[in-house]
Amino acid sequence: MHRRPTCTAIASLVLALACSLSIERAGAQDFPNRAIRMIVPYGPGGITDITARVIAPGMTEDLGQQVIVENRAGGAAIPGMDLVAKSKPDGYTILAATTALAAQPILFRKLPYQADKDFAPVSLVILAPTVLAWTSSAARRRRWPLTSRPNWIAGRRSPNR
């Protein structure tokens, strides 16, 4: 059976590049004329960092300017994303964003940026599966009905959870 992914599923699997929403028109014809910073709001060695470092050389070749990957880890990725949101909106600072960009407004009451207004998607770069896993012995010790996926879903839907 073939299922079409929903927006929620796509959002949970997408690594997208985002840049500041408005790009200045002045000098747009000779863009880029200097190095581009790609901010990765996570530490080195994770999937976002690895992906950014794999695509940066191709971007460098295609754009004719160096694309420099810069890690800005910490604070649930908020400081790195805030750095890009507050950067000059000229396209020279871009963000290697994950689903955290969409989830943060739900998880945090106050953010220093508005994801839907301060960023614009540029490209889908990678689809990465997300897996929920647990040990059945841990489930039995805690008397959770987590011995199978259907039991877990039924438990999540229960009004007494």
Image (spheres, grey):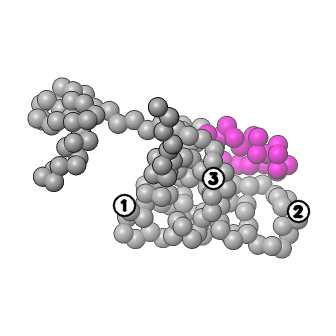
Q: Is residue 122 left or right of residue 130?
A: right
Q: Which residue sits at x=50%, y=57%?
A: 101
Q: CA distance from mark 2 to mark 3?
A: 21 Å
Q: Position of residue 63 (x, y in %)?
A: 82, 50
Judging by the rendered image, the residue that carries numbered circle 2 is 30
Q: Is residue 51 left or right of residue 11?
A: right
Judging by the rendered image, the residue that carries numbered circle 1 is 107
Q: Of all residues shown, which one is farthest toward the front?
A: 1
Q: Of all residues shown, which one is farthest toward the right?
A: 30
Magenta residue check for 68: yes
Q: Which residue sits at x=43%, y=57%?
A: 103
Q: In the rendered image, which quarter is residue 122 located in?
A: bottom right
Q: In the rendered image, which quarter is residue 147 located in?
A: top left
Q: Of all residues shown, which one is farthest toward the top?
A: 137
Q: Which mark is residue 17?
A: 3
Q: Which residues are the magenta region?
A: 51-69
Q: Earlier in the sequence, mark 1 or mark 2?
A: 2
Q: CA distance from mark 1 to mark 2?
A: 40 Å
Q: Quick one: label 1, few (<14), some, or many (20+) residues within 10 Å? A: few
**Closer to the camera, 101 or 6?**
6
> Is residue 74 at all visible to an observer of this figure?
no
Q: Tell me the SS state at disc 3.
A: strand
Q: Marks 2 and 1: in contact by CB < 8 Å? A: no
Q: Tell me the SS state at disc 1.
A: helix
Q: Is residue 79 left or right of residue 140?
A: right
Q: Which residue sits at x=48%, y=58%?
A: 102
Amino acid at dot 1: Leu
Q: Quick one: label 2, few (<14), some, or many (20+) residues within 10 Å? A: few
